[in-house]
Image (cartoon, grey):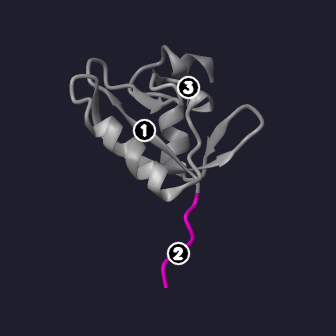
Amino acid sequence: MSRAFTPKVVTANALMDGDAIWLTEDDRWTRDMAEAELIEDEAHADIRLLFALSQPDHVVGPYLADAKPGQTGPEPIHFREAFRTRGPSNYVHGKQAEV
C-alpha cells in the first residue's frame, strides 16, 4: 500500500551563489519559502519538478521537499528544510544576520 501524498514545494540551490531557492506558482525562483507554490497533488508535483530540472542554467539539484500550509505561505516540516530557509551558516550576513 502506498503512502498518502504529503504537500510539497520544489526547492533547489541557485546556480550562481548557492542560496536555497523555491519555485513559485508563476515560475519564478524565490529565496523566501513563504512565496513558494505549495503542491498538494502528486502528478502536479512531478510536473513542477520536471520544469525545475529543465533549468540547469539557473538551478542546481532541484527536488521536492515536504511542506505544510502556514499563515504566510508554505512552511518546512523537516529540520533540514527549516535550516535551509535561514541561509548558509558559514557567514553572518544576509539571512543569518536577520535571525
The kind of residue on which mark 1 rests is Thr
Give the SS element for disc 3.
loop
Residue on which disc 2 sits: 3
Counting residues from the start of the chain, the first of labels 2 and 1 encountered is: 2
- Which element is circle 2 on? loop
Residue 75 location, quadrant: top right
Q: Quadrant of residue 28?
A: top left
Residue denoted by label 3 = 32
Say whether marks 2 and 1 touch (CB < 8 Å).
Answer: no
Residue drawn where x is 59% and y is 42% of the image:
38
Q: Earlier in the sequence, mark 1 or mark 3?
A: 1
Q: Name the front one of labels 2 and 3.
A: 2
Residue 11: assigned label: 1
- Disc 2 and disc 3 in contact, CB within 8 angstroms: no
Residue found at x 49% / y 23%:
31
User: Within 10 angstroms of label 2, few (less than 14), some, or many (20 or more) residues?
Assistant: few
